[in-house]
Image (spheres, rainbow, N blue to C red):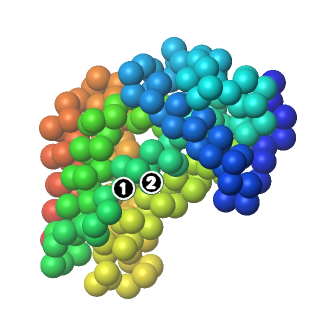
Amino acid sequence: MGGVALGDPAALPASQRARRDRIVQAAIELLEVGEYDTIQIRDVAERADVALATLYRYFTSKEHLYAAALVAWQSGARPRTPARGDTDEERLRSLLKRVVRAFERWPQMFRAEMLLESSSDPNVKAMFQQFSARHTDAMSDALRDLAPADRYAVAEIANSVLATRLRGWALGRCTIADVHKAVQRTVDVIFQ
């Protein structure tokens, strides 16, 4: 239904960037009170006070819009302060607790992430890659005392456990306490 996606949003003129940001914020607000599957793209346009055609100038599909919303939400949800702790182990524990708590507050965002992760849309893939890279970078930044290659490996292991356990939680197969316990146990094993 949509056209060709625009390039880097930072390259847009200020008025267009503000309009695009308003659309993304409207998408996030609707996800705060509803589920991805129930949100209609026209509801986002209405909430952002733009025409549906205007929304499609910035986003080629609902998936593309919500991939942008996921990246924007991550920027807003990301702690302004670095992970706490004197050691890599303490910093990784702190960061993982923050991530789990963010998704605990926003389970709809994680469920949307699960859907977007399997999209074949190239715009969604690019935005999801940006989302994933930011998350991995945050973990790597917390692991200052390890060699760079080891940072990435530890971040990948922790991310794998985190994603698996959050999926189980989102699907009702475990509790959020189980998620916390699993990621903390992973840190125990990594730093034994």
Quadrant placement of the N terminus: top right
Which residue is found at the position 36% from the left and 55% from the top? 78
Q: Quadrant of residue 48?
A: top right
Residue drawn 62% across the image and 26% down it = 49
At 38% from the left edge and 45% from the top edge, which residue is drawn? Answer: 163
- Where is residue 118 drawn, in percent x and y? 59, 36
Horizontal side, residue 190 vs residue 32: left or right: left
Please state which of residues 32 and 100 is positioned toward the viewer in this rendering. 32
Pick the front one: 28 or 164: 28
Depicted 65 relative to depicted 144: above or below = above
Q: Is residue 111 visible?
A: no
Name the amino acid type tagged 2: Ser
Q: Relative to the observer, which residue lies in front, 31 or 98? A: 31
Pointer 1 with pointer 2, Cβ within 8 A: yes
Q: Split into 4 quadrants, where in the image is the C terminus?
A: bottom left
Specify whether 119 is left or right of 97: right
Q: Which residue lies under the disc numbered 1?
A: 78
Task: Identify the residue shown where x is 74% and y is 55%.
Answer: 13
